[in-house]
Image (spheres, rainbow, N blue to C red):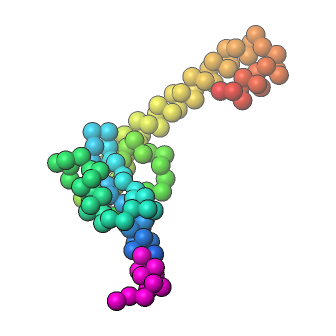
Amino acid sequence: MFTVTQTLLLSLLYSLEINMKRIIYKTEEGVSIIVPSPNWAGTMEELASKDVPQGSEYYIVEASSIPADRKYRSAWELVNKKIEVNQVKASQMDAQEELRNSTKQSMITKLATTLTPEETALLEELL
């Protein structure tokens, strides 16, 4: 039988281990990630059976294997049990962002001909 202290330490270690794991699975949009609640007392497999859509293949991975940079989150794909950035989609995202920025700048330039310098500066801040 464990002492109260030993039980608390084991519980803490289990909680730390669970919170360093993630469940990942493929969706139509890309990749979904399940992060266990700090209060989750079950196993990762139990969490997956509860939250992963039935029939979806999932993987339990280390939290550190999830890309820290979320810029290309919409371009993530699940490849060989890992999250990878689809470079074609990432390039498309960059092109869309560049188009949005150039469109904003074009609008500012057109409006600037009718605005005071102060109004133009304010418009630039807003956009």
The image shows residue 25 at horizontal and vertical percentages of 28, 51
Residues 12 and 122: in front is: 12
Q: Vertically, is 9 above or below 52?
A: below
For the stretch drawn in magenta, the main secondary structure is helix
Locate residue 108 relative to residue 52 in the image: left or right: right
Find the residue positioned furthest to the left. 55
- Answer above or below: position of 99 versus 110: below
Q: Residue at 39%, 62% (x, y): give it.
A: 40
Part of the protein shown in magenta? 1-11
Q: Is residue 13 visible?
A: no
Q: Is residue 6 magenta?
A: yes
Q: Residue at x 52, y 32 (%)?
A: 98
Please tell me whether residue 107 belongs to the stretch shown in magenta. no
Q: Is residue 108 left or right of residue 81?
A: right
Can the viewer see residue 18 in this picture?
yes
> Dividing the image into 4 quarters, which one contains the N terminus?
bottom left
Q: Residue at x 48, y 85 (%)?
A: 5
Q: Is residue 14 above or below residue 116?
A: below
Q: Is residue 2 left or right of residue 5?
A: left
The structure residue drawn at horizontal position 37% and vertical position 40%, both measured from the top left corner, is 89
- Quadrant position of the C terminus in the picture: top right
The one of 107 and 123 positioned closer to us in this rendering? 123
Name which quarter of the figure residue 102 lies in.
top right
Give residue 45's position: percent from left, percent from top: 26, 62
Can you give x and y, in whole percent of width and height, for residue 66 in the image? 40, 58
Q: Quadrant of residue 46?
A: bottom left
- Where residue 16 appears, as percent x and y from the top left, is 44, 71
Most foreground residue, 42 or 28: 42
| Most foreground residue, 29 or 115 | 29
Report the number of discs: 0
Lateral position of residue 98 relative to residue 113, left or right: left
